Amino acid sequence: MKHQISSAKAPKALGPYSAGVATEGLVFLSGQLGMNTEGNLVSEDVAEQTQKAFENIGVLLEASGLTYDDIVKTTVLLNDMKDFAKVNEEYAKYFDGIYPARSCFEVAKLPKNAKVEIECIAIKK
């Protein structure tokens, strides 16, 4: 059985999908942008967008009773691989100890012309 994950503290999905879905010990969070709850990007700066994307992830994890430590896999989408180091610098702040497995891709364009999007899979212990 699955159930939807959402929070008034996180932006609503931009399309016909859930911000997150939990099922049988796993939590799947859709890609998060650096958006506020009004659906606007917080900045043009990739570091600030990364911070806000992780804040949104944190709110959704909290709604599931989880923390960043429960994330086992992330996928990072960048619109310019030149931002890789800046994103890594911010990314590292959210994990202590074992980092989750990760993939990172450069894409032609992201919703809202964002510079970074981060999705994750977390596990309920």
Image (cartoon, helix red, strand yellow):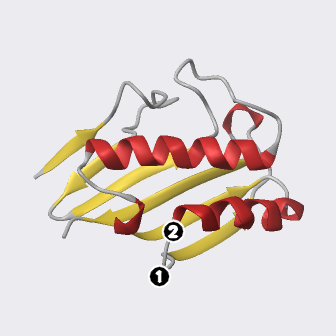
Residue 66's disc is none
Residue that appears at 49% across and 41% down = 56
- Residue at the (28%, 41%) spot, across then down: 63
Q: Is residue 90 left or right of residue 113?
A: left
User: Residue at coordinates 29% horizontally, 57% vertically from top-left?
Assistant: 27
Residue at 45% in and 27% down: 12
Cβ atoms at labels 1 and 2 below 8 Å apart: yes
Which one is in front, 121 or 53? Answer: 53
Closer to the camera in the image, 69 or 77: 69
- What amino acid is labelled 1 in the image? Ile
Q: Tell me residue 122's x, y (percent).
A: 34, 64
Residue for badge 1 = 98
Taking the view exactly as shown, the residue that stands out farthest to the top is 38
Callout 2: helix, strand or loop? loop
Q: Where does the image place residue 44, in percent across and percent down from the top left?
A: 82, 35
In the image, taking residue 9 as reference, residue 42 lies left or right, namely right
The amino acid sitting under disc 2 is Phe
Quote the CA–CA distance across marks 1 and 2: 7 Å
User: Callout 2: 10 Å neighbours few (<14), some, many (20+)?
Assistant: some
Q: Nearer the viewer, residue 22 or 65?
A: 65
Judge whether 111 appears above or below 46 on screen: above
Relative to 59, 65 lies left or right: left
- Residue 125: image quadrant is bottom left
Q: Is residue 40 left or right of residue 70?
A: right
Mark 2 sits on what residue?
Answer: 95
